[in-house]
Structures are given as C-alpha cells and as structure tokens.
Image: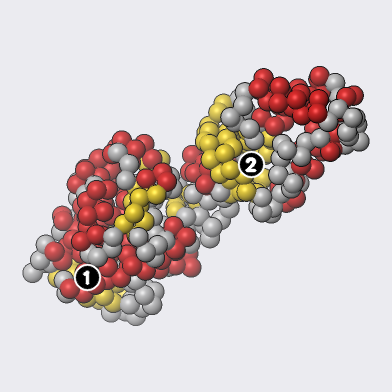
Amino acid sequence: MKKVLVIGGGAAGMMAAVFAARGGREVHVFEKNEKLGKKLFITGKGRCNITNAGEMDTLFTSVVSNSKFLYSAFYGFTNEQTIIFFEELGVPVKIERGNRVFPVSDHSSDVIGALSREMNRLGVEVHLHAEVEKILTDRENPELIRGIRLKNGKEVAGDACIVATGGISYPSTGSTGDGLRFAEELGLKVTELFPALVPMEVKEWYAKELQGLSLRNVTAAIYDGKKKLYEEFGEMLFTHYGVSGPIIISASSSVGKKLKEKELRLCIDLKPALTQEQLDQRILRDFEENRNKQFKNSVDRLFPAKLKPIMIELSGISPEKKVNEISKEDRIRFVKLIKEFPMTLTGLRSYKEAIITKGGVSVKEINPGTMESKKIKGLYFIGEVLDLDALTGGFNLQIAWSTAAAAGNAV
C-alpha cells in the first residue's frame, strides 16, 4: 500500500489526508502544534467561512494571483462539492451576505471536528508535536521522494509527500514558512512574499483621532499618481495606525506590491450615493436651514460625531464663521473633501495581522491537475504555501479544499 506523508494539519492538510485515505492509501499527518486546525479555528472570526456559493466565474475573478492555474482544481472539486462534503460529514451550512458559506452553528470547531472524525474513521494516523525538519529524496535518484526527517532526528519513509504548511501569516498558529524552505532546499522557485488581506498604515495625524470609527456604505479608491489601482464600496474602519475593515483588507491584496515601493493615495467617498452636484444641493439646503448658525454647528447631520471636527478642520473654513458668510468656492471645496476624503498609505501591517500570505511556491513548478512538483515525483504542494491568494469571502479556503482534493486524489 502506498504510504502518504502529509506535512501540516490545517485545512488543506486535513482535506488532502481524507481524500488520500478514501483512495485506500496509508496516510500520516505531521502537525507541529499540539492540535489540528489552529489557523482554521480563527478563520471568519471563529465562524469559519467555509467557501463562497457564488458562480464559478466569481470564484475565478476573486482569485488575485494565478487564477488560471486553478481551473482544473476548482472544477475538480467545486464550491458546491465542498458544501456537500461538509454536510455529509454532519456540518449543515447557511449562506450569508456576499454568498459566504458558514456552518449553521457558527463554530469553526465543528469543521475541524468533522475533518478529524473522518480522518479517524479512515485510519489516518495523526502525529502531533511532530515538526518536520527536512524532506528527503532518494539518494540514487534525487527526483524521487523517500520520506521526511523530523526535528527529533527520526526519519519516516514514504512514497509521497504532501506539503500543506501554509504561508507565514499568523505565525502564532504555526505558519512559519517551513514549506517554502522545503521548496527552496529542493530547488523549486519561491516568489516574493507579502502580507495580504491585511490592514494598512497611513501618514495623516487624524487617523489616530478617528480610531475606532467604522464607516458603512463608503467607496475607497487608491491611486498611484493619477492611475486608479483599486476601488470598492463597503465598510471600513479607522485604527490608531491607519485603516482596516473589509474594503481596505481586500485592497491590500491588489496594491501591496506597489505600496512596498512607494506611498499611495487613498480617497474615501463619504457619500457615494450622491453625485458632486447632488451633494452640493444637499449642503445648500442644510446651510439654508442653518444660515445664522456657525459653520461648526451646521454639519451635524452629515457626519458621525468623531468625524465632524476633522472635516471642519480640513475644510479650511473657520468653525466660527456664519453659514451665510461661506463663499461658493469654500462650499465647493467642502463638497470635494466629502467626496475625496484624503489619506496617504505608507505601508502594510505585519504578517502577524495578515489573514494570508501573498506569494509562495511558484505555480510554474507545479502540475495544475495534481499539485505534484514537475521536478520531483511524489512531492505535492497545496493551499497557502502556493503562490495563490484571493479576496475575503471564503475564496482562500476554497483554494485550500480544491488543491487538497487534487493532490489527495492524485496520490
């Protein structure tokens, strides 16, 4: 019987183990942590966004890096099959806003438990506190896998090795780049790495003043000079260091590489439902109602309380100025400020705060149908260790499930 060694007991590793064992293989999972699924446990804020129930086109357009590589994997194990897989293992699911799929229980532990039970049923041997130090190739033929060496010096023979170690984001969960090191040691190319789906830092003093303020229904646009790199409508959050929230975190995957080279301009449209002309008319009406009030007392309905003093200061209009004394030029400038609230992005936050890692084992080195290395027979890479990343919404876990199924079936 073929013996399969899976390095990493996270989402991809557990799924690959299940598929390999269902195919009649002897499977061993090596996990350096004290338990399985440590990163999976915290995904979706602990609720585990299993997949996305959107059309296949949506899956592909939501993959930021190397989406074409996933054609075979995504069609080989679809989002629909993922839902069926978990429901058959006793995890009923529900579909929420944006086609996000969650367990009905809202507990990621149910997903981990289901995979663990299925592995146990199939006879998969799980080795905890088992850190792999090196992947071993055949001495006579270095293009063949012969096993692994653990950190304690013990060698384990195997016919195939599936690397499911993740990237380097959330290192506290055990994602410390082991699989990337294995790949490089074996002569495979690893692309440049960046934190992805991560908050961003800004230059402006007023970010700290706005700390904790969440804005809904705004549009964020990011520019390199006059060139628009990204635009999205939704929710964002101000922090003591800069900006976060769904639309900002998604933006980081698109602009992270550019942001490493230079500062970028962030413009927030605080009233995207109104054109500049409509907003001007709205402000004119407000000014007319409050014509004898001071400017600082006339904009209460426009902004949250925390944002109001910042908008007044940035407007360049004296807070004490009577509304009926504000010039048309001042008003137009104020409208522009609301439509293009300015911030300067200076960098990404660290891997400790990144949901995923951008970059990884080059997909040019990997067979897209099986996830097997083109150079070394019996060596497979799956999940986040590969140079694949997607937006939030369940897409990254679908990459894990689909690549794991491809490798598990292939062995």
- Answer yes or no: is residue 135 visible: no
Q: Residue at x 37, y 45 (%)?
A: 99
Work out whether mark 2 precedes mark 1 in sequence or the reverse, and give the earlier one: 1
User: How crowded is the residue under tag 1: few (<14 C-alpha within 10 Å), some, or many (20+)?
Assistant: many
- Answer yes or no: is residue 285 visible: yes
Quadrant of the image occupied by residue 22? bottom left
Regarding mark 2 in the picture, which secondary structure is present there?
Answer: strand
Q: Residue at x 44, y 67 (%)?
A: 173
Residue at the farthest front position: 289
State the image coordinates of residue 376 (x, y, percent, origin top left): 21, 55
- Image position of 327 (left or right of 94): right
Q: Residue at x 53, y 36 (%)?
A: 233
For label 1, the residue is 119
State the image coordinates of residue 28 (x, y, percent, origin top left): 22, 72
Question: Which three-letter amino acid code belongs to the residue tagged 2?
Answer: Leu
Spatial CA span between label 2 and label 1? 45 Å
For label 2, the residue is 345
- Image position of 338 (left or right of 317): left
Looking at the picture, tell me which residue is in the foreground, 151 or 122: 122
Looking at the picture, tell me which residue is in the foreground, 184 or 87: 87
- Between disc 2 and disc 1, the foreground one is 1
State the image coordinates of residue 386 (x, y, percent, origin top left): 34, 51
Looking at the picture, tell me which residue is in the foreground, 149 or 163: 163
